[in-house]
Amino acid sequence: MDRSELQPLIEQILNEALLHNWKYWLVYGATAFLVFVAANLISPYLRTRAQSYATKVDFDILLQQVRAQAEATARINAMVSHGEWTLQEYKKTKRHKLELLVELALELREWIFEYRRAILYCRKHEASEPLPKFRMLQALYFPELNKQATAVSVCFRDAHRFLIQVDGALLGFPDNMARVDEFDKSAPEFNKLNSDLHESILAFNDSAHAIMHDLMRVVQS
């Protein structure tokens, strides 16, 4: 059998095979179509879903970081605010104590004058001495004023000691006028001691006012 006779026979066999297996070829074609659809439609969808999920995960992580940073910032702000409030209260307390200290410094000179009047007119001097409170307040809150406060204390003690001596010397003068006349003999010395006390208090107050200026500036800011 030559090739011209074999060719029609082969085509006939193939045609009959296709006709008898059409169901197979139909399933095969449908499967190939579905694979094509999956490759061209489902795969991009899955890639998009995967990208969306990854983006969501990244967003959640970023959101957690932002929240953590916000919480840390809030804590820091709270600490700073508390620190500022504490500083403000501390400065206000010092301002109040400084006002008391200046008042006590002025009371020292007034106390000396009251003691002098009590000596001259035979009266009991009932007011307590303000110097211990003055020095205690200064040492606790304003150690930077120690030099000025010490100068005030020395002048106060000198004036106080002088009046104690005068009081003893005037025991033999029960008459008030006589006591005043006798005291006048030592008036120049007392005036000098009183002037020294006055000058020391002025110097103390000048230093106290400088501190008060700084405290007022901090409180107002």
Image (cartoon, rainbow, N blue to C red):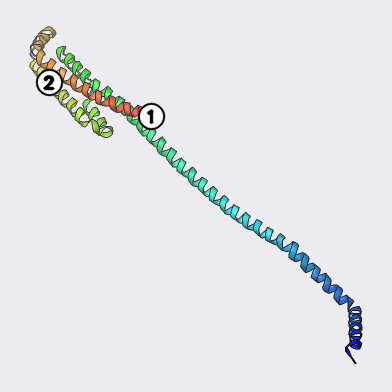
Would you say 189 lies left or right of 67 here? Answer: left
Which of the labelled discs sits on residue 75, or is there none? none
Which of the labelled discs sits on residue 219, or is there none? 1
Q: Dividing the image into 4 quarters, which one contains the N terminus?
A: bottom right
Q: Is residue 92 above or below residue 2?
A: above
Image x and y of residue 136, in percent: 24, 31
> Which quadrant of the figure has residue 81?
top left
Q: Nearer the viewer, residue 161 or 170?
A: 161
Label 2 neighbourhood size at 10 Å, few (<14), some (14-19), many (20+)? few
Q: Nearer the viewer, residue 32 or 105?
A: 32
Comes first in the chain, label 2 or label 1: 2
Q: Nearer the viewer, residue 169 or 109?
A: 109
| Mark 2 vs mark 1: in front | 1
Amino acid type at mark 2: Ile
Q: Are marks 2 and 1 in contact (CB under 8 Å)?
A: no
Distance, label 2 to label 1, CA atoms, is: 44 Å
Image x and y of residue 148, in percent: 20, 28
Q: Dividing the image into 4 quarters, which one contains the C terminus?
A: top left
> Which quadrant of the figure has residue 8?
bottom right
Which of the labelled discs sits on residue 164, or is there none? 2
Image x and y of residue 94, in percent: 32, 30
Q: Which residue appears at 74% of the width and 66% of the height?
A: 39
Amino acid type at mark 1: Val
Query: Considering the numbered disc 2 on the image, is that residue within a helix, a strand or a loop?
Result: helix
